[in-house]
Structure formats: C-alpha cells, structure tokens
Image (spheres, rainbow, N blue to C red):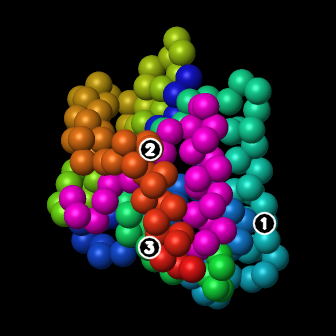
Amino acid sequence: RDLHSFPTRRSSDLRAPPVPGLLQTAEYARAIIQGVEPTISEAELDNLVAARMARQALLARASAPQFFAVVDEGALRRPVGEPGVMQRQLHHLRVAAEQPHVTLRVVPLTTGAHAGLRGPFVILEFAGEPALVFVENHDTGLILEEEADLAAYRLALGTILHAALAPAATTDLITQIAAELG
C-alpha cells in the first residue's frame, strides 16, 4: 500500500504549513502544536506529541508502507521552536529520506503559484481497496472516495510533482537550508 502526503500552503494563508507529522521530531511537533494552540495544557500537549510520535511507528515497521511526501520550501525555512529545533528537524528529514520506503520532494519557493496552494491533502492507496483522499483544514478533516474527486487530486498531484525538486535535489536543498541556519 502507498501513503502519499502533500502538505502545501492554502491559497488564503501566506504561512507554509509544517512538515508532515510522520516526519516530525518530537520537539518540532511540540513547538508546532504550541504555536497553533498557545493555551493548550502541558498534559494535553504531551499527549498530542506522544500520539504523533506513536503514529510514526508505521514507518519503522518491517512492512512499512511507501510514503511519499511533498513539502513546500517555506515549511523548511520557517523558524519553529527554540534555536536548534529546525536544524535537528532538517537533519531528521535527511535521514528519513534515506529510507527505501520514504520519498521526500520539496516544491521550491522559486516555483511561485502551483496547484498545492489550494491546501494540504493526502492520497491513501491500499492493495485491493479503493483509494481515498483526506483533506484537512483548520477544524476538520474530510475523506473523499468518489472517482471524480480522486481524479482531481491525482491531477493536482501531477502538477505539484512537476514543480517539485527530484529527491536528490531535495536532499541538497535541505542540506543547504540547514547550513544557512548554522
């Protein structure tokens, strides 16, 4: 089965979204959650971070699914957390991208407008089962299963991938951004 994740910017939101949850470090996840929910209790924050880290076990299994993520460069350049958090997050991305079942691509800022600006989505494909699209916004998520919806999101994926850097160039860009952070 394949798991595709395509977090990109919403067209009405100038901020790049965070790195996909399955590729986040615990400290980055904590900083992101605190940033969007500043009044969250420490206990709830701990639970949310623990849940996000537990979901990452999916990628560590011997039978891990293929995971394909496309990230907007803005998400990699946005300072998140205390000094050093982004540096460690970028290192984590480089290590994750070396796994044979993980493909990471970045849409560079120089691309300008692209289909991913409509918002983040995940295409879930399972052997012997119908594919699904998961679309998420600020307060809710929606699962789409109609063929017309799948076709539209696959078309969007194709145009996003046309704009995205190849995996090796993605790793080079992540390394460059990490070096810029010092």
Q: Is residue 131 visible?
A: yes
**Residue at the spot of label 1:** 47
Magenta stretch encompasses residue 107: yes
Q: Mark 1 and mark 2: span between their CA atoms?
A: 35 Å
35 on left or right of 106: right
> How far across and down, in percent of the image, does residue 58 sit?
71, 38
- Residue at figure coordinates x 76%, y 27% from the top left: 62
Instruction: Work out which residue is located at the far left of the displayed protein and give it.
Output: 113
Q: Quadrant of residue 71?
A: bottom left
**Quadrant into which the N terminus falls:** top right
Magenta stretch encompasses residue 70: no
Pick the residue in front: 8 or 165: 165
**Pointer 1 or 2: first along the chain:** 1
58 on left or right of 67: right
- Residue at figure coordinates x 64%, y 85% from the top left: 83
Secondary-structure class at tag 2: helix
- Residue at figure coordinates x 26%, y 59% from the top left: 117
**Pointer 3 or 1: first along the chain:** 1
Number of marks in the rendered image: 3
Secondary-structure class at tag 3: helix
Q: Residues within 10 Å of mark 2 (few under 14, many from 20)?
A: some
Q: Is residue 34 visible?
A: no
**Residue at the spot of label 3:** 77
Q: Mark 3 and mark 2: span between their CA atoms?
A: 18 Å
**Pointer 3 or 2: first along the chain:** 3
What amino acid does circle 1 point to?
Answer: Asn
> How far across and down, in percent of the image, does residue 49 sit?
73, 65
The magenta segment: 86-111
Secondary-structure class at tag 1: helix
**Quadrant into which the C terminus falls:** bottom right
What amino acid does circle 3 point to?
Answer: Arg
**Residue at the spot of label 2:** 168
